[in-house]
Amino acid sequence: MAFDQLDEHEQSEIVRKWMRDNVASIFVGIGLGLLVIFGYFQWQGHQARQRVMAANEFMSFGAAVGAKNETAAKATLERIQKDYSGNVYAVIAAMRWAEGAIARKDLAAAEQSLQWAYDHAGNNAVKSLAGQNLVRVKLGADKAAEALTLIDSLPVEGYASAIAELRGDALLAQGKRDDARNAYQASIDALEPMAPNRQSLEMKRDDLGGSAAAATPVPAPAGAEKQSS
């Protein structure tokens, strides 16, 4: 018999019986739902607290760097990397530490710090920036082959011209002048017409001269007639 064919008394009795039989499951379901909601807000609160604490540590790191207190800066950096490795502040701090290492001509320390930043970057734009800086350090350390391998894995994220230029630098370091010239041309092609670094890129390209193919005249086909001027 269909439920809607019963009278009100019979319907209410069926509902009350179902409630008695399932009351435990209902309360368990409600309790689990409340726990999920509570846990979500707790997690959100924890994330917010983590961001605030990471920001405070980053400010302490910046102050130590500004005061040229390398010992305090390094200790703070290590603390940020340990406690907040998934936070963008840790990645930026590692990149800033690398800048100081480059200024001190400590390329090994700069490479290590930038590698950490590259490995822990949470989005492709930051990852690409860290990777580009890492490529430059590798080139400075005469590691052109490693630099090229890294270039192949860099996220583009709007950096097509910069990455192509780095490819040209790495190829030139390997003595591959024609390939380097092509890479510089690709970098130029990816630029806006009025980009401020366009001229410097054109100078890099032009300093390499024409390609071997362009420098060698192509013989005219046999029997071809000269066009009259």
Image: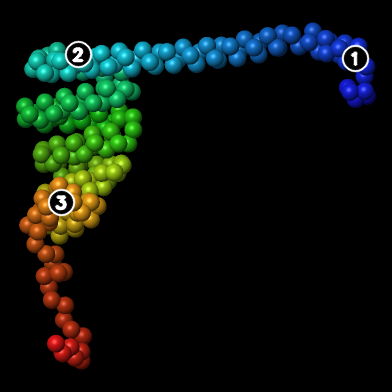
Left or right of residue 218: residue 154: right
Q: Earlier in the sequence, mark 2 or mark 1?
A: 1
Examine the rendering and report whether any part of residue 37 can be seen.
yes
Please, is residue 83 above or below residue 168 in the view?
above
Q: Nearer the viewer, residue 89 or 147?
A: 89
The image shows residue 153 at horizontal and vertical percentages of 29, 43
What crowding class fits label 1: few (fewer than 14 Cα within 10 Å), some (14-19), or many (20 or more)?
A: few
Q: Which residue is mark 2?
A: 60
Please name the amino acid that badge 3 sits on: Arg
Which is more toward the observer, 65 or 115?
A: 65
**Rendering quarter of residue 5:** top right
Please rate how many residues cluster around mark 2, counting C-alpha atoms within 10 Å: few if below 14, some from 14 to 19, many from 20. Answer: some
Upstream in sequence: badge 1 or badge 3 = 1
Does residue 79 appear in this view?
Answer: no
Q: Amino acid at mark 2?
A: Ser
Q: Which residue is mark 3?
A: 198
Q: Which residue is mark 1?
A: 8
CB-based contact (under 8 Å), mark 1 and mark 3:
no
Quarter placement of the C terminus: bottom left
Residue sitting at 36 percent across and 12 percent down? Answer: 49
Residue type (three-letter) at the residue carrying disc 1? Glu
121 is higher (above) or lower (below) than 176: above
Contact between marks 2 and 3 (CB within 8 A): the answer is no
Residue 62 position within the rendered picture, expressed as x and y whole percent measured from the top left = 17, 18
For this view, does 180 lie left or right of residue 31?
left
Q: Looking at the image, which is closer to me, 30 or 98?
A: 30
What residue is rendered at 21% in x and 85% in y?
A: 221
